Amino acid sequence: MNKLMGFYELREMSLPSIPWKEYTPDVELDPNILWTIRTAVYKGKDLNLPRKVGVDSIKAKRFGDKIYNELIDIGMVIYYPYFVAKKSGNLNVYQNKVVIEAVKNDLWNLVSLSDREVTIIINEGIHYNGNAEFLEKEEIKSLMNHVPEIRKLFRSELISGENILLEWSYAFNCDINARPIGNKYLVFYEARTIKEYC
């Protein structure tokens, strides 16, 4: 399952996920909030694709129009309101265990900078590597509450030896200056299957 399929899978699941929509040049973006524009291809390499994260409507529109024309035959552009992440990570679901990785603030700190506060391995027990206090018990519980549905939906992939990787954040909506507003919430924004090779 690639990035594009993952976007559609998240939309169909009951997981709290980003309210993404497909971008076209006739889309009008609210100038009072910040935006994220991401890209996905129908097939082929779909890691490190072009994106703009947390930009005003003018920059988002300029980038969206440009990348839309470049991807028109090979992929699509999506957009959604930007959010401020306070904690982020990966939820990696295997047939017989769950691995949670978490980092401060944005997920790019984990992906790009290899920062990591904690890795939690949950199988017959719970094992911590790193700062065991970083995620609150309620935050772990909230993530784990979604594992049964993930296992049900991806049963055949799990049986065939794949694992399911979901990206998540505990986040806040924000204003045009990226200041958090409202209450913290859990949001998933990418799902993909990964084949492990020994």
Image (cartoon, rainbow, N blue to C red):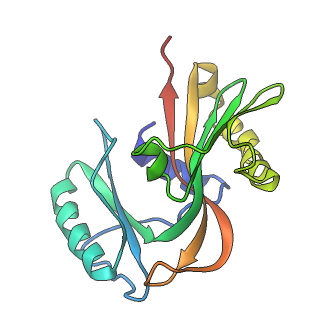
* Residue drawn at the location 52% of the way across and 80% of the way down: 179
Quarter of image, res 80 = bottom left
Q: Nearer the viewer, residue 170 or 75?
A: 170
137 lies above or below 128: below
Q: Nearer the viewer, residue 29 or 184?
A: 184
Q: Nearer the viewer, residue 49 or 42?
A: 49
Q: Position of residue 153 (x, y in %)?
A: 65, 39
Quarter of image, res 86 = bottom right
Lateral position of residue 196 relative to residue 76, left or right? right
Report the residue that reaches farthest toward the bottom. Answer: 32
Quarter of image, res 118 = top right
* Residue drawn at the location 46% of the way across and 71% of the way down: 82
42 lies above or below 34: above
Q: Position of residue 67 (x, y in %)?
A: 21, 61
Lateral position of residue 92 relative to residue 84, left or right? right
Q: Position of residue 150 (x, y in %)?
A: 67, 41
* Residue drawn at the location 21% of the way across and 74% of the way down: 62
Report the residue that reaches farthest toward the top. Answer: 198
Q: Position of residue 106 (x, y in %)?
A: 50, 57
Count of marks, rendered view: 0
Lateral position of residue 164 relative to residue 25, left or right? right
* Residue drawn at the location 56% of the way across and 52% of the way down: 10
24 lies above or below 141: below
